[in-house]
Amino acid sequence: MRERCPNARYIGVGKLDGYTLDFTIYAPHRGCGAADIVLNPHDSVSGLVYELDNDDLSKLDRIEGSPIHYRRVSVNIELLNERKDVFAYEVVNKSQNVPPSHDYLNLLKQAAKQYGFPASYRSKLDAILPL
């Protein structure tokens, strides 16, 4: 995030209930599927939460291809034992079965370990089959 949005301020690890992590879009620059949140009332997604200024938010929109490839959606998460309204990026035109690369998946796994995501969520990441 620091490379993309230099003024971003890390807040903590958030939990988004009612969604699951999936890979529903092909990212040409990565050569593999990229992460998405997909509605699922029986699951949750963990992720890093940052505070962004307007300049960094505009940069991140461009990087994520918003609003063509990803769109910002308002979601309610659990963060630091409180409920917070934040936004997340969601794929606009979802495809099925676009697996991540080994390197991309490892990036997600390393972040989950480094930032102390719940063990149950890290186990879900371990079960994903890369390209």
Image (tube, rainbow, N blue to C red):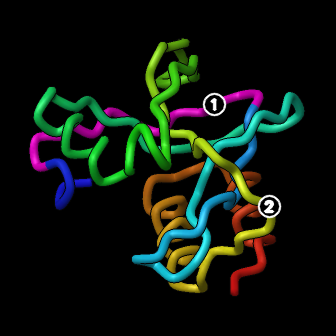
In the picture of the structure, the residue carrying the numbered disc 1 is 16
Depicted 130 relative to depicted 34: above or below: below
Q: Position of residue 2 (x, y in %)?
A: 19, 55
Left or right placement of residue 6 versus residue 80 in this view: left
- In whole angstroms, how far apart are the C-alphas of marks 1 and 2? 21 Å
Left or right placement of residue 76 versus residue 19 in this view: left
Query: Which is nearer the N-term, disc 1 or disc 2?
Result: 1
Q: Position of residue 71 (x, y in %)?
A: 48, 35
State the residue at coordinates (11%, 49%). Answer: 6
In the picture of the structure, the residue carrying the numbered disc 2 is 96
Q: Which residues are magenta?
A: 6-18
Q: Looking at the image, is mark 1 or mark 2 nearer the viewer? A: 2
State the residue at coordinates (63%, 31%). Answer: 16
Quadrant where the C terminus sits is bottom right
Other residues around mark 1 within 10 Å, as few (<14) / some (14–19) / many (≥20) = some
Q: Quadrant of residue 129?
A: bottom right
Q: Position of residue 62 (x, y in %)?
A: 27, 48
Q: Amino acid at mark 2?
A: Gln
